[in-house]
Image (cartoon, rainbow, N blue to C red):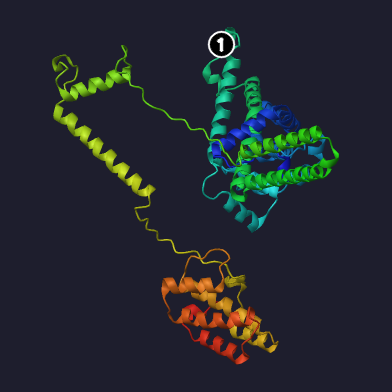
């Protein structure tokens, strides 16, 4: 993506601000995006609606609803190109359909169909076109904290579809003349083919609005998440600063040329040129300092209670509070005329119970907010699959460790022999002594973490000797002798079977 061509300002936003940006996308391209929706869905929906009306069944309409991820693919393709200055025509969308509609579609129509994050995750499969473990890792990163509110967006659009559909149906039925004697139950039970067709048509008209809006908001959430993670705003800001510096260099070069040519120019002309150049340079500096990169403008809204003690009229809420406190006081209210005479002791007991409960709740919330409470977790650290580029998964380890080491030594590859032994040792030690490791941790970082959390038991002490031999061979290019490698392998086999058996 060429970020410089984006027609919208890519900046870190809250999820709801990003959703609002998506509504702006829809409003800006409402005409073309509606044409795209009609091109790909009008004929299929008309056939399915006809089949539903003839067979008096809702199953054809359910099929269209289930295929929503398929109908949303052209909409997302249009938005993703239009945002960066390329407005795809209907012919181009039809021609490119296999390239953007098929990646990840099988999963979206089966086990991922009911995912509330469909609008957000579809951007990963369609725009990035990743598969398998790469797609899973990518989705895990993009859906990490803080939440992108994709599930809440789906819930809102779902309710919006229902309310708009029922509202449009009610409007049409209210316009029907009374001599047809329609009842509310006829909308849902014992429907005729005409009534089913009208209901289906109302649903499709609503989809012409909600589906392009849903895709636009999901696309905006995806752009916002990538802006937060990849710093798109910083990249664009630095690019603009680079362009301004290049412009400043051109101005300086022009000034040098004018200074060299000044002796050959008339004094008045030289003074006029210098003043105009200085004014232009000052204006550029002022605009640069006033830009959002240097002086961001933030708006804050504060609400304050206005004292209305002197006002003649009081609201019903103020009167209610005055009445309650008068009851608690027991002085200003005539209890004989009250409809219910509640004892003062009971009222005070209820009041103090609620007050103490509220105070305790606030204390707990504050303690959680500042991390004063310790959250006990029984979850063991996840054993990593790779350490310092070494694959330590069980399925990647040889079934016979001694044979693999001997074959590498006979081939004269001491590094390969130590690598096999290092992988097996790391897998066994981490299985017995699990520790949290960051992605990309080195052998020494893994060893230090193990020593800090578990001390120096026999396996960790062995790992330290093996790590020294591995670093000397692999990184210092000073390979140890074959006898040292065999000795290390023999010592590992003599460890506890739980730690040495990796088959």
Residue 247, compared with residue 423, is above or below; it is above
**Local SS, label 1:** loop
The residue positioned 14% from the left and 30% from the top of the image is: 345
The residue positioned 29% from the left and 18% from the top of the image is: 309
Residue 62 visible within the image: no
Where is residue 213, by image quadrant? top right
The residue positioned 62% from the left and 53% from the top of the image is: 138
Percent of width and height locating residue 326: 20, 21
The residue positioned 47% from the left and 30% from the top of the image is: 301
- Residue 318 falls left or right of residue 193: left
* Within-10-Å neighbours for mark 1: few <14, some 14–19, many 20+: few
Residue 298 visible within the image: yes
Where is residue 48, by image quadrant? top right
Residue 100, compared with residue 28, is above or below; it is below
Q: Which residue is mark 1?
A: 181
Percent of width and height locating residue 404: 63, 83
Taking depth in this image into account, of 422 and 399 the one nearest to the observer is 422
Taking depth in this image into account, of 451 and 339 the one nearest to the observer is 451
Percent of width and height locating residue 144: 54, 50
Residue 400, compared with residue 291, is above or below; it is below
- Residue 269 falls left or right of residue 140: right
Residue 61, compared with residue 5, is above or below; it is above
């Amino acid at each position: 993506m060429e970020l410089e061509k984006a027609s919208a300002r890519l900046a870190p936003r809250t999820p709801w601000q990003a959703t609002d940006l998506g509504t702006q996308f829809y409003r800006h391209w409402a005409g073309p995006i509606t044409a795209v929706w009609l091109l790909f869905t009008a004929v299929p929906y008309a056939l399915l609606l006809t089949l539903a009306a003839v067979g008096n069944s809702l199953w054809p309409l359910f099929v269209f609803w289930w295929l929503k991820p398929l109908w949303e693919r052209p909409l997302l393709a249009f938005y993703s190109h239009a945002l960066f200055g390329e407005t795809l025509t209907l012919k181009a969308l039809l021609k490119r359909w296999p390239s953007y509609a098929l990646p990840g579609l099988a999963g979206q129509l089966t086990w991922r169909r009911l995912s509330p994050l469909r609008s957000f995750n579809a951007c990963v499969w369609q725009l990035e076109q990743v598969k398998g473990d790469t797609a899973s890792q990518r989705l895990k990163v993009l859906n990490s904290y803080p939440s992108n509110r994709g599930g809440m967006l789906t819930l809102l659009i779902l309710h919006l579809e229902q309310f708009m559909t029922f509202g449009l149906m009610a409007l049409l039925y209210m316009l029907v003349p009374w001599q047809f004697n329609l009842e509310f139950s006829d909308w849902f039970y014992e429907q005729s083919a005409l009534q089913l067709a009208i209901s289906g048509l109302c649903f499709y008209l609503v989809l012409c609005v909600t589906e392009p809006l849903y895709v636009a908001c999901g696309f905006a959430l995806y752009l916002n998440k990538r802006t937060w993670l990849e710093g798109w705003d910083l990249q664009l800001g630095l690019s603009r600063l680079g362009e301004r510096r290049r412009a400043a260099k051109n101005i300086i070069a022009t000034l040098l040329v004018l200074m060299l040519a000044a002796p050959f120019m008339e004094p008045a002309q030289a003074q006029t040129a210098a003043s105009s150049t200085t004014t232009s340079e000052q204006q550029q500096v002022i605009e640069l300092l006033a830009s959002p990169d240097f002086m961001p403008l933030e708006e804050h809204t504060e609400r304050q209670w206005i004292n209305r003690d002197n006002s003649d009229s009081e609201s019903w809420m103020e009167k209610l509070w005055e009445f309650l406190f008068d009851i608690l006081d027991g002085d200003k209210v005539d209890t004989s005329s009250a409809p219910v005479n509640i004892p003062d002791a009971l009222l005070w007991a209820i009041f103090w119970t609620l007050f103490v409960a509220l105070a305790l709740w606030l204390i707990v919330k504050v303690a959680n907010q500042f991390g004063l409470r310790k959250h006990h977790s029984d979850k063991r650290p996840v054993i990593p699959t790779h350490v310092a580029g070494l694959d330590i998964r069980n399925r990647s380890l040889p079934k016979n460790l001694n044979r693999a080491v001997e074959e590498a030594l006979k081939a004269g590859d001491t590094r390969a022999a130590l690598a096999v032994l290092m992988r097996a040792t790391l897998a066994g030690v981490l299985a017995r002594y699990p520790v949290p490791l960051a992605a990309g941790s080195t052998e020494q970082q893994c060893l230090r973490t193990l020593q800090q959390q578990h001390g120096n038991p026999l396996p960790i002490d062995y790992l330290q000797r093996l790590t020294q031999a591995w670093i000397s061979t692999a990184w210092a290019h000073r390979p140890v002798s074959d006898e040292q490698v065999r000795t290390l392998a023999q010592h590992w086999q003599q460890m506890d079977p739980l730690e040495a058996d990796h088959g």
